Image (cartoon, rainbow, N blue to C red):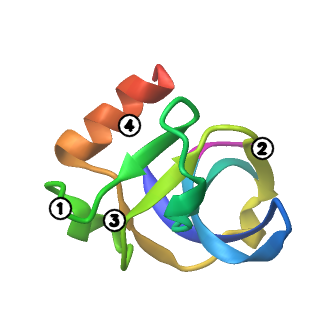
Amino acid sequence: LDICYVRVRLGEADYLRPGVILAVKENIACVAAISSRLELYRRSEHFMISSNQDDFTATGLKTASYVVSDPFFDVPVEGIGKKLGTLKGDLGKRFKDWMGL
């Protein structure tokens, strides 16, 4: 579960942001956006990535953030930017469980 920069519109924000690459099929990546605007975090809708969790440093994120579950974005693979890190270890397992993967 790679975390890469992607350009997606999330609410009013339209800029490069981290996103989790969920799957790639026929040159289209399914991406879940990541936000660090913790005041918008909703436990029932988002997956928290706390900076004090094991494996946080592997994400490449600079601060606590969360994965947005709706919507997912279809991004052409050529639109996937620099890889920041990965969701791995217990953090990756919890994310997969949360996603039902």
| Left or right relative to 76: residue 4 | left
Name the residue located 34 percent from the left edge and 52 percent from the top edge.
87
Name the magenta segment's main secondary structure: strand
Mark 1 vs 2, N-terminal side: 2
Question: Which residue is under mark 1?
Answer: 52
- Give SS at disc 2: loop
Mark 3 vs 1, N-terminal side: 1
Is 20 in front, or is 82?
20
Mark 4 vs 1, N-terminal side: 1
Q: Which mark is residue 66?
A: none
Q: Distance between the residues labelled 4 and 1?
A: 16 Å
Mark 4 vs 2, N-terminal side: 2
- Give SS at disc 1: loop
Please name which of the two marks, 3 or 2, marks the residue nearer to the observer.
3
| Mark 3 surroundings: few (<14), some (14-19) or many (≥20) residues within 10 A | many
- Give SS at disc 4: helix
Q: Residue 59 carries which label?
A: 3
Name the residue located 71 percent from the left edge and 38 percent from the top edge.
70
Q: Does the magenta stretch include residue 73?
A: no
